[in-house]
Image (tube, rainbow, N blue to C red):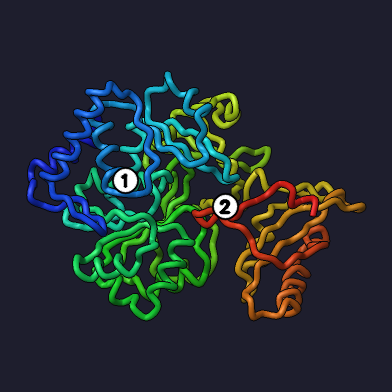
Amino acid sequence: MSSLYKIFLKNIKKKPDTIFIYDLKKNFNGAACLKKINFLRKFIRKNKINTIGLKYKNSSDWVFWYLAADSLDKKIIVIKNSTTNKDLNKIKNIRNDILFTSGTLNLPKGVIISEKAYLHVAKILIQKLKQRNYHIELLSMPFDHSFGIVRLRCCILAGTKMLITDGLKRFPEIFKFSQENKLSGLSLVPSGLALIKLLLKNKVNLFNKNLKYFEIGSSNINNEQRLWLKKNFPKTEIIHHYGMTEASRSFLISRGTKDNLKKNTNKIGKIIPECKYKIDKTNNELLLKGKNLCDGYFDQKNNKDKFIDGWFRTGDIVKKKKNQLYLVGRVDNQFNIGGNKVQAEMIENIVESIDHVKKCICFVRPDEIYGNSIALKIEKKSTVNKKNILKKLEKKMRKLSDYYNPKKIIFEKILLTKNGKKIRIPQQKFI
């Protein structure tokens, strides 16, 4: 039995009449939670189930299964639709929990996570966000995502009441709940933040009046979102985190009160306690080590180069300036143009800083002079003339070396994952 279940059990026995889990259909007090969990515990024992695979949409049932399995020290596998039977057959001898997730390249991977790793991170987050047992947190981030499941663990450990929803599809009902029950916290990726902003419109003051905290991850938030946060959530504790599934929340950046919300920044933040980092001098890749790291992958063969002497290779290129780390790009997205290293993300940040540009993807195509040359795919706002964007882009690119200038530009919609990440198709470099 893990610490997670023990703490939850202690809370519900102490306050059996208090509601711990809300959803938009039914609420569960401590006694109802215990009844559900005990029923599932008996079912697991009776049927001699050793491995629990969870792939339901976010729901109270998902949480009850998770806690029942955890209470019996059963292996929990959080799987995605892309997870195959072949993947599952490989994990029979692995004891720790496994989170099937998609990485930066949107390829499924099974990450082995020990209790000590997620407890370490959760305790830090609870303290930073001043999370309390009388708060109510909206859990809308998918539990098959490391961000969503860590927020769930934080709520269980802090005794925080939970409103569990499958994303933000039923936002009118979520908004109504927030007015009636004083919603205290939430967690969102930047795309979810943009959706909240769109849905709230002029009702933001009604939504934020009781909001004590929220966490944002894991990609950068743009200038418009920063200013909106500063204006509309002046008293809310906000943390933005960096860290993939393998190294959850390695760095945290607290919402600033002044200038650091006025401009785009790739600042990573301060590293969490009992973790450390170093930068590979050969390619400026960020390496991490510490208590928050996962124990490895279910398929070590495909990921054998990710861990070296206990250090996790993040795949992120960084630069250090005045003792501060900045994210530059990805190893996967680094191009060689005429012997010069060019980061796709650096070019994309320049293009996306132009008014009326929604998204940009930078890739390469064959070039007679440099071997490769830059090409861009740009998604613009529908009413904007392409010539205006091209004129502004040309002005920005004048300040850079010639090999940075794009030789081909395509205007079309850019595909995103459900978590708002750009889908980078390798074939794009041949367009």
Residue 199 x %, y %: 40, 72
| Residue under the image location 17 percent in, 50 percent down | 28
Residue pointed to by mark 2: 327
Q: Is residue 123 visible?
A: no
Q: Position of residue 80 (x, y in %)?
A: 47, 41
The residue sitting at the top extreme is 93
N-terminal of the pair, mark 2 or mark 1, is 1
Q: Would you say 144 lies left or right of 84 here?
A: left
Q: Amino acid at mark 1?
A: Ile
Quadrant housing the C terminus: bottom right
Which one is nearer the viewer's eye here, 148 or 60?
60
Q: Is residue 430 placed above or below 86 in the rendered structure?
A: below
Residue 143: horizontal and vertical position, in percent?
A: 38, 46
The part of the image, by quadrant, that contains residue 279 is top right
Query: Is residue 339 toward the left or the right of residue 274 in the image?
Result: right
Quarter that holds the N terminus:
top left
- Report the disc number at residue 124: 1
Residue pictured at 40% horizontal, 65% vertical: 256
Badge 2: how crowded within 10 Å, few (<14), some, or many (20+)? many
SS of the residue under disc 2: strand
Picture residue at 48% right of the left edge, 44% below the top: 244
